[in-house]
Image: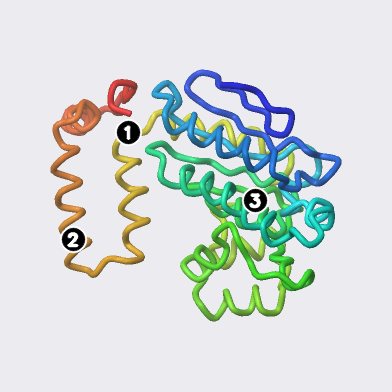
Amino acid sequence: MPMSQHLLVEVEKGVAYLTLNRPQQGNAIDLALAQALLHAAIQCDQDRSIRCVVLTGAGRFFCAGGDIAAFTEAQAQVPAFLSELAGILHLAISRFMRMNKPLLVVVNGTAAGAGMSLALIGDVVIAVENAQFAPSYGAIGLSPDAGLTWHLPKLVGLRKAQQILILNQKLSAAEADQIGLISEVVTTEQLQKRQTALIEQLLNSATPALSNVKQLLLNSHQNTLETHLELEARSIAAISLGESAKEGLVAFLEKRAAQFNQDSEI
């Protein structure tokens, strides 16, 4: 996978590690970083050897949001600039959320603006105890992008989402965990150990089943009950003849842990 100075990418033993790498700018998203994220998302989606993706940031910030300096430089062309920046970033987010392998987001510091949006796209999201989540858009007179108004009401409810966005409310990691914005909070000392444990668990899971879970959860927001029940029925039937399902069922009957090897099924 090609390297970018804005996004560090390392693939090792079935795991793609993606690190936002503009620490001096708080990992703020400019066009180059958005493009690197899109390229990485496509590669992670298409590369059959990758079974789990980890996204984090370098330095003290996870991501400070969009690069305000770049907004200013665009001057009168800022509408076109923001349309291009958001459009590219949105393509990356869509691909990450719809790829058939799990995404673990490790929030190592402050996640603000589009960085908060990016933090929420993971299937599992862990944050260090000193991390903060801030919408920030209202402070600069802009409305949210990168899916924040899509994610927030689904994760925390409409009323809480209104409070966070309209009042530009900053949340600690503990507060974010309490309202269901993230999966869990860990100390800085625990972070690496917990990340490793989650990666191992995801790698040892039935990736085809996880893929179906991701798609069913995404579709649940728009489907009627009957439509969704039909999708669930078709999903479980279609996946039942796969090698992972066969191994899982046999392992259950033999009262042992399943040994999944999904490389041929991803």
Between 231 and 91, which is closer to the camera in this rendering?
Answer: 91
Tell me how far mark 3 sits from mark 1, CA to CA: 35 Å
Left or right of residue 239: residue 204: right
Query: How many numbered dots are placed on residues in this image?
Result: 3
- Callout 2: helix, strand or loop? helix
Question: What residue appears at the point 30 percent right and 44 percent down from the top-left corner?
Answer: 212
**Picture coordinates of residue 257, whole percent (x, y):** 30, 28
Left or right of residue 221: residue 230: left
Name the kind of residue labelled 3 in the image: Leu
**Picture coordinates of residue 56, whole percent (x, y):** 65, 40
Which class describes the residues within 10 Å of circle 3: few (<14), some (14-19), or many (20+)? many
- Which residue is the site of mark 2? 229
Q: Quadrant of the C terminus?
A: top left
Give the mark, 3 or 1, whose residue is nearer the N terminus. 3
Name the kind of residue labelled 2 in the image: Leu
Q: Which tag is nearer the camera, tag 3 or tag 1?
A: 3
Image: 135 above or below 206:
below
- Callout 1: helix, strand or loop? loop
Instruction: Identify the image quadrant of residue 141.
Output: bottom right
Image: 89 above or below 264:
below
- Which residue is the site of mark 3? 85
Which class describes the residues within 10 Å of circle 2: few (<14), some (14-19), or many (20+)? some
Name the kind of residue labelled 1 in the image: Ala
Tell me how far mark 3 sits from mark 2, CA to CA: 37 Å
Asked if labels 1 and 3 touch by Cβ distance under 8 angstroms, the answer is: no
Question: What residue appears at the point 20 percent right and 53 percent down from the top-left corner?
Answer: 232
Q: Which tag is nearer the camera, tag 3 or tag 2?
A: 3
- Which residue is the site of mark 1? 206
